[in-house]
Each structure stands twice: as C-alpha cells, then as structure tokens.
Image (cartoon, rainbow, N blue to C red):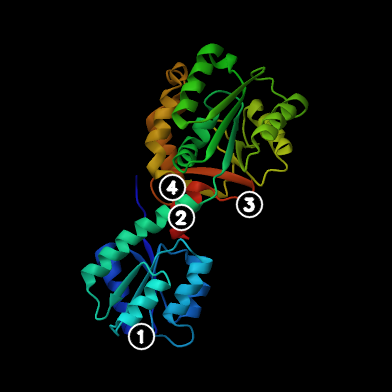
Amino acid sequence: MVEESPRVLVVDDDPDVALLVKTVLERRAGCIVDTAEDGRSAIELMTALRPDVVVTDIEMPGLSGLELLDELRRTSPHVPVIVMTAHVSVEYAVSALRAQADEFLTKPLDNARLVEAVTRLAAEGRRRRDEARPKEVVLAIGAHPDDVEIGVGGLLAAHAHAGDSITILTLSRGARGGDADSRQSESLAAADMLGARLFVKDLIDTEISGGGATVRLIEEVVQEIQPTIVYTHSSHDRHQDHRAVSEATIVATRRVGTVACYQSPSATIDFRPTRFVRIDPYLEQKLRLLERFSSQTASRDYLEPDFVTATARYWSRFGGGKAVEPLEVVRETAEFVGAHELTRRET
C-alpha cells in the first residue's frame, strides 16, 4: 500500500529552531512540515492541517508547550505529541509524561532520534486515527452486474480496507448482456472479494423505471441496512437503465447524509465530477474485481485492464496520484475514505 508523506506541525517561538526541525524532517524523513510560533497559533492550525505528529517546545509565551499538550489531549487525543526543551531536568520530563507526551527530546536535538521518533509516531498516529474513525455503512447501487465495480471498485476496496460495512444492490440480473445465472455468480464472487453483502433484484434489463417499483426496492434495502454513504449511477448517461436507477436512488435515499454518483462507460460529456478520489493503493484490487466478470470481458473493451487503468490515470490529473475515481456529489455529510485520507494533504 502506498504511504503518504507524514504531516508534522512544529511549534516553537524560536524561528531558527523551527526552521532547523522543519529542514531535518523534510530532507531526512520526507515529511510535509508546517510551523507555528506559539501554542495558540498551533491550536488554530490543527483543524485545517490535521497533522500526523505535533512537535512542540515547552517554554513559549502565551500558551506553553505543556498547556498546548493538555489542550491537544482534549481536542485531538489521537495525535502523537513530541515535547522538546533546552532545559534538561527530571521535573520537565515528569511534567511532560504526566501530560501524556509521546516522546521527550532535549535540545540541542539529536537529528537521528528526531527523525526516528517522528517516523514511528506518524505511523502510530494513523493507526490510532483509523481505529477511532466511525465505521461507515456503504450502499453501492447499480442497474446491472459489474456496474458498481466499474464505477467505484477502487473506492469500495478502500472502504473494505477501512473496515466499513459494504452492501451492493444490483437491480437486474443483466440478462440482455449475457447469461443471467452466470452474471449473478460473477457478482457473488466480486462481493465475496470485498466482504460485501449482495442483493440482486429481478427488474427487467433495459426496462428499469425511475419511480414506483424501483424506488420501493431501493427503499427496502435502505431501511434494512441504514447506510451512511450511497454510490449510484449518474443521470448523465446514455443508458436508460442507468439514468432510471440514478433518479430512483436519489428519491429513495433522500434521508441518507451522503450520496454520490459514479462514472459508467456510457456516461455522457455532461458527467461533471466534483470529487476525485485517489485509489492508487486499490487499483490492482479493482482490476481483480473486474476479472470476476469473465462472461463480459471478451466483448466489453471497457473491462480491459489497460482501459480501466488509463481511465483512472486520466482522472488523476484532477485528483493527484496515479489513479482516481471521479464522483458527482449529490450531498455530503460523511467523509469518503479515499478522498479524506489519500488527498487531504494535497489540499
């Protein structure tokens, strides 16, 4: 899995020391480093920067390092904090440890120890954050087998990696595109790879309605699983089933906080994504998911690995990295796994 560069907030009222720590961490540890001149400035930056580690001096005007540490333990309990001081004493060390500092360093700093501590604690901080993150309940809705895997296969893999609950709802068996039984078996194999629950309904392929029965089928699943995030087709699509499912989903999920539309191979030029989710670590898993749909791969060019990879690479021009899945966000109150964790450092 690709690891993002650790983000570090250095807090010191001595600009020379702050610059030294910043330079060492950038050059030797590959960190992204921001600085604050005092504790109050650091608190103001925490929400915007969301650092993996905070490195703070003890003696500063206004809000001291230990007072900052107390505040961070209250507001950002999962962020590791390294306390540094030029005054070596048992009293300082005990005070820092009692305030739950993760590391205590003395000045002049040992650069090797600084780099080791920041690298180790950045990994620890991410682990704490992942464990503390509320788990999402994800519902991915498609008109036919393989629709959701094409549109958000990488993002679903990211949700699975994060431990989120995943349900896939396929509203027809795709009989017009192949043998319905084979396609259902392929869908089951793909869902099994994700650890996802699968619902397959019996609406008629190419004749799915945007209201009535379709809305009720989606509402039944929504009522049962209570999703926090829903992915579905875009209305900007040449396929009538895709447009109908998009319309029905937006009605049936009107009480769900986050709803986003993915791109299908039949999307039109009017597909206008507003969120670009990096899937660099999950592209290979997406390709393996699509391999499960072997009845389609011989006749569907858009399922070829080179095509899928090139599409993800194209969207990376907007989302960074090397592979991206685009989304039209209808509404958003939850955080997309890939979008938040993989792209937040670039914004």
Residue 147 versus residue 91 in the image, above or below:
above
Q: Position of residue 154 (x, y in %)?
A: 46, 38
Within 10 angstroms of label 3, few (less than 14), some, or many (20 or more) residues? Answer: few
Indicate which disc, 4 or 2, sits on the residue closer to the N terminus.
2
- Disc 3, SS: loop
Q: Position of residue 247 (x, y in %)?
A: 71, 34
Q: Which residue is mark 4?
A: 316
Residue 154 versus residue 216 in the image, above or below:
below
Q: Which residue is mark 2?
A: 129
- Disc 2, SS: helix
Q: Amino acid at mark 1?
A: Asp
Give me the residue at 38% from left, 67% from top. Answer: 8
Q: Which residue is mark 1?
A: 14
Of residue 189 and residue 322, the one placed in the foreground of this image is 189
Of residue 17 and residue 146, the one placed in the foreground of this image is 17
Q: Which residue is mark 3?
A: 333
Distance CA(mark 1)–CA(mark 4): 40 Å
User: Is there CB contact under 8 Å for labels 2 and 1?
Assistant: no
Q: Amino acid at mark 3?
A: Thr
Indicate which disc, 3 or 1, sits on the residue closer to the N terminus.
1
Of residue 111 and residue 312, the one placed in the foreground of this image is 111
Distance CA(mark 2)–CA(mark 3): 19 Å
Residue 120 versus residue 256 in the image, above or below:
below
